[in-house]
Image (tube, rainbow, N blue to C red):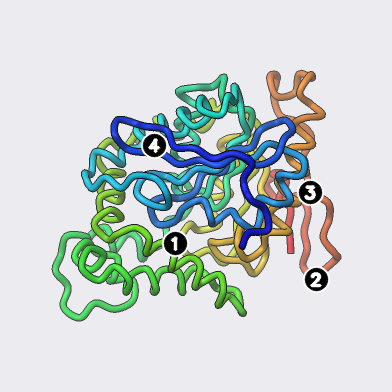
């Protein structure tokens, strides 16, 4: 049973790979929710959709490799450019000329590329725990995992499980470890069970292929940073301060480069969209209200705007306002 069923659903053919999408509600601007496939699919947005769909048309898609979308196994099928065109194809299929992209983790890399290649299609970007290259601080366990990716490790434990041989041959073991590490909040049993079950709808072979695809055509650091600076759309970054997948400093750096705003959720990990859906939805709706109100004015074309912040949470010790660097950081806790 769902709290909100889609008003419309469909599958588009992308070179023999079906891409499944759903449409909820009405109202502009349209929001397109992009999951970090193939380790999950569109159900990861289930706690956000009912509230957002009361005010907006909300589109979700299952990225290739999971959910009701096709499951190619070739590495080339998961290139960023392919995922980018999947996103654009869904916008075309639902007749959305433009949308606010809401992306999680590495799907934000795709969202940046969509905005770069199709600037007329992107109204704004909400980046939740952005998994983008080079920026901020990289978690050390990912550095070590990349170094040992092809190695055959005897009796791997912990982050050693992020290894091609383990992911392909012991997929469940890696998935259970990964989501247990991400859900740092207490009382996360249901969210953990959901996340594991969604990931296991795909396979280790597909997950490994998607990981390897990211390394086939990486941009340079200078090129990616320049792409972020010229993004040209309003940006909101939402990040948990205890995220062990994407360090909060990465979100902070992405907000700085894009001229965006940063909301840090205290005590939260990587999956704020499932563990703190009320805070995330309040931040998204406040941001969308702001850009809608400003849509006929010049600030987004001429430079920095006044800092935006979501409706304030109840006061708590340690809450802060503007950071020492002058960027506006809104604690949401």
Question: Dot 4 surroundings within 10 Å: few (below 14), some, or many (20 or more)?
Answer: many
The residue drawn where x is 61% and y is 79% is 186
- Residues at discs 4 and 3 in contact (Cβ within 8 Å): no
- Mark 1 in CB contact with mark 4 (< 8 angstroms): no
Q: CA distance from mark 4 to mark 3?
A: 31 Å
Quarter occupied by residue 260: top right
- Mark 4 = which residue? 83
Q: Disc 2 versus disc 4: distance between alpha carbons?
A: 42 Å
Say which of marks 2 and 4 sits in front: 4
Mark 1 or mark 2, which has the lower sequence index? 1
Measure the alpha-carbon separation of dots 3 and 1.
31 Å
Residue that numbered label 3 is attached to? 310
**Residue 249 horizontal side relative to residue 316, left or right:** left
**Residue 198, label in figure:** 1
Whole-number angstrom distance, CA of label 1 to CA of label 4: 19 Å
The residue where tag 2 is placed is: 317
Disc 3, disc 1: CB below 8 Å? Answer: no
């Amino acid at each position: 049973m769902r709290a909100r069923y889609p008003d419309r659903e469909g599958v588009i053919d992308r070179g023999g790979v079906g891409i499944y999408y759903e449409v909820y509600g009405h109202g502009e601007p349209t929001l397109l929710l992009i999951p970090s496939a193939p380790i999950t699919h569109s159900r990861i947005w289930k706690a956000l959709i009912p509230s957002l769909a009361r005010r907006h048309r909300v589109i979700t898609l299952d990225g290739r490799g999971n959910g009701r979308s096709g499951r190619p196994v070739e590495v080339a099928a998961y290139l960023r450019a392919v995922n980018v065109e999947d996103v654009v194809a869904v916008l075309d299929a639902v007749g959305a000329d433009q949308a606010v992209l809401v992306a999680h983790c590495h799907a934000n890399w795709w969202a940046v590329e969509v905005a770069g290649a199709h600037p007329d299609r992107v109204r704004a970007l909400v980046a939740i725990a952005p998994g983008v290259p080079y920026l901020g601080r990289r978690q050390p366990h990912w550095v070590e995992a990349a170094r040992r990716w092809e190695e055959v490790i005897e009796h791997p434990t912990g982050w050693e499980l992020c290894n091609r041989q383990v992911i392909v041959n012991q997929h469940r073991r890696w998935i259970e470890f990964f989501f247990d590490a991400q859900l740092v909040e207490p009382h996360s049993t249901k969210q953990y069970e959901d996340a594991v079950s969604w990931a296991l709808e795909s396979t280790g072979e597909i997950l490994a292929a998607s990981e390897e695809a990211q390394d086939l055509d990486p941009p340079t650091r200078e090129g990616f940073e320049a792409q972020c600076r010229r993004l040209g759309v309003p940006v909101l970054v939402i990040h948990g301060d205890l995220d062990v997948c994407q360090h909060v400093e990465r979100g902070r750096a992405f907000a700085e480069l894009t001229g965006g705003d940063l909301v840090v959720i205290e005590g939260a990990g990587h999956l704020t969209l499932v563990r703190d859906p009320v805070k995330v939805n309040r931040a998204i709706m406040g941001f969308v209200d702001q850009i809608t109100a400003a849509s006929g004015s010049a600030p987004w074309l001429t430079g920095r705007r006044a800092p935006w912040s979501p409706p304030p949470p109840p006061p708590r010790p340690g809450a802060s306002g503007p950071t020492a660097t002058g960027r506006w950081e809104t604690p949401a806790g």
